């Protein structure tokens, strides 16, 4: 079974100052968390960019 990576959650928790390991402790693999963080860094996006896309925020 393939699990869905919670990229928005990763970016929000990172913006709150959590480390990759602390984020992974929320129920994701460290590899998945690192992949999201690396991709976000590479593309220059963060929670401020993604948070605007969520209705009601």
Image: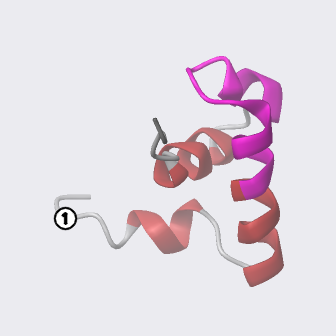
**Picture coordinates of residue 14, whole percent (x, y):** 68, 44
Residue range highlighted in magenta: 19-35
The chief SS type of the magenta part is helix
Judging from the image, the colouring scheme is secondary structure
Identify whether 34 is placed above or below 40. Answer: above
Give the residue drawn at x 82%, y 77%. Answer: 42
Queried whether the magenta region covers residue 32, the answer comes back as yes
Asked whether 25 falls inside the magenta stretch, the response is yes
Residue 32 percent coordinates (x, y) = 70, 44
Q: Residues within 10 Å of mark 1 (few under 14, many from 20)?
A: few
For this view, does 22 lie left or right of residue 8? right
In the image, residue 13 above or below residue 57: above
Please identify the residue farthest to the front as the structure is shown. 1
Residue 22, picture quadrant: top right
> Does any portion of residue 11 appear in the rendered image?
yes
Give the left or right position of residue 47, taking residue 37 as reference.
Answer: left
Q: Position of residue 54 (x, y in %)?
A: 28, 64
Q: Nearer the viewer, residue 33 or 45?
A: 33
Quadrant (top left/top right/bottom left/bottom right) for the C terminus: bottom left
């Amino acid at each position: 079974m393939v699990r869905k990576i919670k990229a928005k959650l990763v970016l929000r928790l990172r913006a709150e100052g959590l480390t990759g390991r602390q984020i992974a402790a929320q129920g994701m693999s460290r590899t998945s968390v690192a992949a999201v963080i690396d991709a976000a860094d590479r593309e220059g996006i963060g929670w401020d960019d993604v948070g605007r896309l969520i209705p009601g925020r």
